[in-house]
């Protein structure tokens, strides 16, 4: 019935609260009982002090004189309606009572014996009489001028009425405690429900999201941590939905990208097979082999890109770092892509710097992969007769620790909505241009593994500028000298 947070609340908080209320109720009841008992005892003690004046000059030591004096005291006692007075002789036998009735000799008078042992000659007793009635008594000894005990007076009062009032007040206190506990349970239950119900809803929604239902939404009921968690889960569902859509688009794009070269390879292979049955002219053979080699290389590039992406996602990307000339690596990539730019009617502008550049510590193949990806994208999105400009800089004074490579194109550009997402996995801003949509994500990860950065600035209809920043190589001696400074 009770589980989770509710169970912990009941067996921790509520148990502690119950014990505290029980202790308070017990303490109050004990205080009430003590108060009433002390009030009765105080009244009995006050009345008993009258003995000091009544028997102040009493010097007789015979029983007749004692009985006569005691009778006069009992007859003149003013509190007969409130309590009973008993006169006890020296042997502990009751010789007279204010009620006039004989007293049961079997009734034990414990307080008289206790008073004998008390220095003040006074003792208090409370308990049940032989009749079963609850009572309380005070016994004070009477001594003669020689200090010998010649008897005592016992004042006894029924505590049934007091006991009844104590029970009534105790029940009232218990009811107040139960009401307070009930109020705490109600308010606590409401509070727990305000947590448990949304948490259960959060759990159910999270379970739906885990099973692929990203359209489910949570209603924000409270403007607190639960509300913030609801917003976070809604945002997560939206992001997962977008990611799922991007993943599906990515799979569709990759399937298309793989199908195109495979179709070309299969088509030309079949053409060459059919043509081989008769004499195959050299021109057709060369063209077919050229297409097969080109599309095979394109297919290999797509597969390698997917493998790199998988390695990055699982943290298995390993760099074979070495001290290298970044200028030479960039020159090689530009040389590879220059013919393509010319064939597509695009201008690839690059002026090789005349100054020497400091070395970079990195993986040459991975850095070339980054340059190829960035320049390839620039050419891909730049229209015919457009310009792709590449520049490499190293400023010894302003930024001596970094080498900056910029690739600027005059292509279609990226919208402000798409710009923050172009480096995310599976994301592709322009669906009209071929590509898997993971090239920039892979390039960005490789640059980050080199302790560098890849930044993109773009405007629709203006073009795009990609800035790659790589740290220069510093050996141990360089670092030691810079630390010494």
Image (cartoon, rainbow, N blue to C red):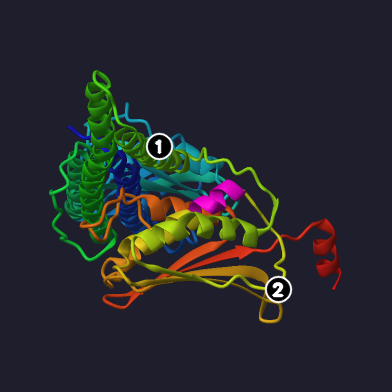
Q: Is residue 184 visible?
A: no
Residue 482 drawn above or below residue 129: below
N-terminal of the pair, mark 2 or mark 1, is 1
Residue position for label 1? 300
Q: Is residue 448 visible?
A: yes
Magenta residues, as a range?
Answer: 364-370
Residue 151 vs residue 403: left or right? left
**Rendered location of residue 357, percent (x, y):** 70, 67
Magenta run includes residue 120: no
Q: Residue at x 85, y 67 (%)?
A: 481
Magenta run includes residue 369: yes
In the picture, the quarter occupied by the N terminus is top left
Q: Nearer the viewer, residue 451 or 347?
A: 347
* Number of other residues with Cα within 10 Å of mark 2, as a class: few under 14, some 14 to 19, many 20 or more: few
**Rendered location of residue 28, percent (x, y):** 32, 53
Task: Classify mark 1: helix, strand or loop.
Answer: helix
Residue position for label 2? 355
Q: In terms of image quadrants, where is residue 423?
A: bottom left
């Amino acid at each position: 019935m009770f589980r989770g947070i509710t169970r912990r609340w009941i067996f921790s908080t509520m148990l502690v609260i119950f014990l505290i209320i029980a202790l308070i109720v017990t303490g109050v009841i004990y205080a009430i009982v003590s108060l009433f008992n002390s009030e009765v005892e105080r009244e009995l003690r006050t009345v008993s002090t009258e003995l000091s004046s009544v028997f102040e000059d009493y010097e007789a030591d015979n029983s007749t004189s004692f009985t006569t004096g005691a009778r006069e005291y009992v007859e003149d006692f003013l509190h007969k309606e409130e309590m009973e007075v008993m006169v006890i002789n020296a042997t502990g036998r009751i010789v007279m009572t204010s009620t006039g009735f004989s007293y049961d000799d079997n009734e034990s008078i414990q307080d008289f014996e206790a008073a004998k042992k008390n220095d003040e000659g006074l003792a208090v007793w409370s308990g049940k009489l032989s009749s079963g009635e609850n009572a309380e008594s005070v016994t004070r000894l009477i001594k003669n001028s020689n200090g010998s005990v010649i008897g005592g007076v016992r004042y006894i009062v029924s505590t049934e009425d007091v006991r009844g009032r104590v029970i009534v007040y105790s029940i009232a206190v218990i009811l107040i405690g139960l009401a307070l506990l009930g109020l705490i349970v109600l308010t606590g239950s409401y509070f727990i429900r305000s947590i448990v119900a949304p948490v259960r809803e959060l759990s159910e929604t999270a379970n739906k999201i885990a099973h692929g239902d990203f359209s489910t939404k949570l209603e924000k009921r409270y403007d607190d941590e639960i509300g913030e968690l609801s917003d976070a889960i809604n945002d997560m569902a939206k992001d997962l939905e977008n990611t799922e859509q991007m993943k599906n688009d990515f799979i569709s794009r990759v399937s298309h990208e793989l199908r195109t070269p495979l179709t070309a390879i299969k088509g030309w292979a079949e053409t060459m097979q059919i043509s081989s049955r008769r004499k195959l002219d050299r021109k057709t053979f060369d063209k077919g082999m050229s297409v097969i080699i080109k599309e095979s290389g394109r297919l290999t590039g797509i597969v390698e890109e997917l493998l790199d992406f998988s390695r990055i996602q699982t943290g298995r990307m390993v760099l074979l770092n070495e001290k290298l000339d970044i200028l030479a690596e960039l020159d090689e990539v530009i040389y590879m892509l220059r013919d393509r730019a010319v064939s597509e009617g695009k201008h690839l502008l690059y002026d090789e710097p005349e100054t020497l550049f400091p070395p970079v510590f990195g993986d040459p193949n991975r850095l070339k992969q980054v340059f190829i990806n960035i320049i390839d994208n620039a050419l891909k999105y730049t229209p015919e007769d457009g310009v792709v400009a590449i520049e490499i800089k190293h400023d010894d004074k302003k930024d001596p620790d970094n080498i900056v490579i910029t690739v600027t194109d005059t292509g279609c550009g990226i919208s402000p909505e798409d710009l923050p997402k172009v480096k995310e996995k599976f994301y592709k801003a322009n669906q009209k241009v071929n590509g898997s949509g993971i090239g920039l994500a892979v390039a960005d990860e490789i640059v980050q593994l080199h302790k560098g950065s890849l930044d993109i600035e773009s405007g629709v209809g203006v073009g795009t500028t990609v800035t790659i920043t790589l740290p220069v190589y510093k050996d141990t001696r360089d670092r030691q000298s810079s630390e010494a400074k």
